[in-house]
Amino acid sequence: MLPVVVIHGGAGTIPKERAGQATSGVCSAARAGYAVLQGGGSSMDAVVEAVTQMENNPSFNAGCGSVLNIKGDVEMDAIVMDGKTLGSGAVSAVRNIANPIQLARLVMDKTSHAFLTAEGASLFARSMCVPEVPQESLITEYARMRWEKNLAPGANPVESQMGKMGTVGAVAVDREGNLACATSTGGILNKMEGRVGDTPCIGCGGYADNNMGAVSTTGHGEAIMKVTLARLILFHMEQGQSAEVASDLGLACMKSRAGGLGGVVTVDPRGHWAARFSSQQMAWAAAQKDTLHYGVNAGEHFTQSIDEPR
Ligand code: ASP
């Protein structure tokens, strides 16, 4: 069953014309993560590689392609967590860098802290020689169009927030049985300046523990935080539920108690995995035993050989 990597490309509603890009994005990220694992890399290396790829892919709401805040700026959040040590690293409201997930990993690896925010995170990035990029290089035409549309009189901001999400995340178990998770996002459209969502918050946007499992979440951040979704799912797994049932229980609680929709990828230490969502859609992909699994709509599960081009 090992190694395995499972990816999501955000819970929400994916417009028809973008479903193909989202699917090929998650599939190639799953391939990239799996290649790291097959080459003997750690689960942490695999999830960071997969998420980096999706941050660089303008189809997703992370890195280049991030949604814009109310002022039209990009502010990004990310987290990584290592299931062996319970070490984690997170950044929030960071600007002008291409790969927040790599900065989150540097926070874990190079500081004695778990979470840096805003200007402090930028200072740290500079000290680590992370290249600064102009904000324009992170903004796609599509993101700008959606932002402009949302500011138009009569726009329904809630509907458009839930409309097209594209946060990215990954969980993996390597050959040694170590688990890791990584999640990265531009947040929600038209968020207030300085708004921090669930993604970088430990137990909300992700959690990994070698003894229980690993989860990466996506969906309405304020609702995810109310139920600490990642940790809630692992609580159910600790109580003996499968990755799939625990994920469904967590998402159901988020819906009934917090009125929020979302999606998750979950894996247990033996490599049983689940990709579940209460939103209309979520692009997901998993790589295990040289097979690629993927889907976008509820109930969809396609498989093909990992080497076959999609
Ligand atoms: N959870 C993210 C946030 O609220 C958004 C998403 O997953 O699409 O910032």
Image: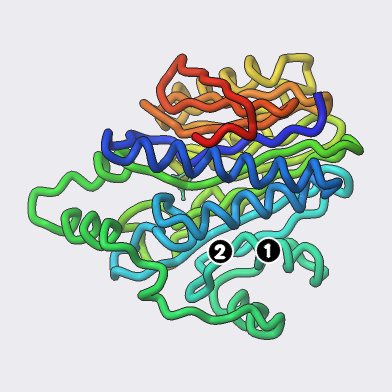
Residue 55 in percent (x, y) is at: 52, 57
Mark 2 close to ligand 1, CB under 8 Å: no
Mark 1, secondary structure of its residue: strand
Image quadrant holding the N terminus, namely top right
Q: Mark 1 = which residue? A: 115
Q: Are marks 2 and 1 in contact (CB under 8 Å)?
A: yes
**Residue 177 x/y as whole percent:** 88, 35
Q: Residue at x 56, y 19 (%)?
A: 248
The three-letter amino acid code for the residue at tag 2 is Ser
> What residue do we see at 43% from left, 50% from top?
60
Examine the rendered structure and indicate whether residue 127 appears above or below residue 54.
Answer: below
Disc assigned to residue 106: none
The disc at residue 92 is 2
Q: What amino acid is at disc 1? A: Phe
Q: Could you classify mark 2 by the number of other residues whose Cα lies within 10 Å: few (under 14), some (14-19), or many (20 or more)?
A: many
Mark sitting earlier along the chain (2/1): 2
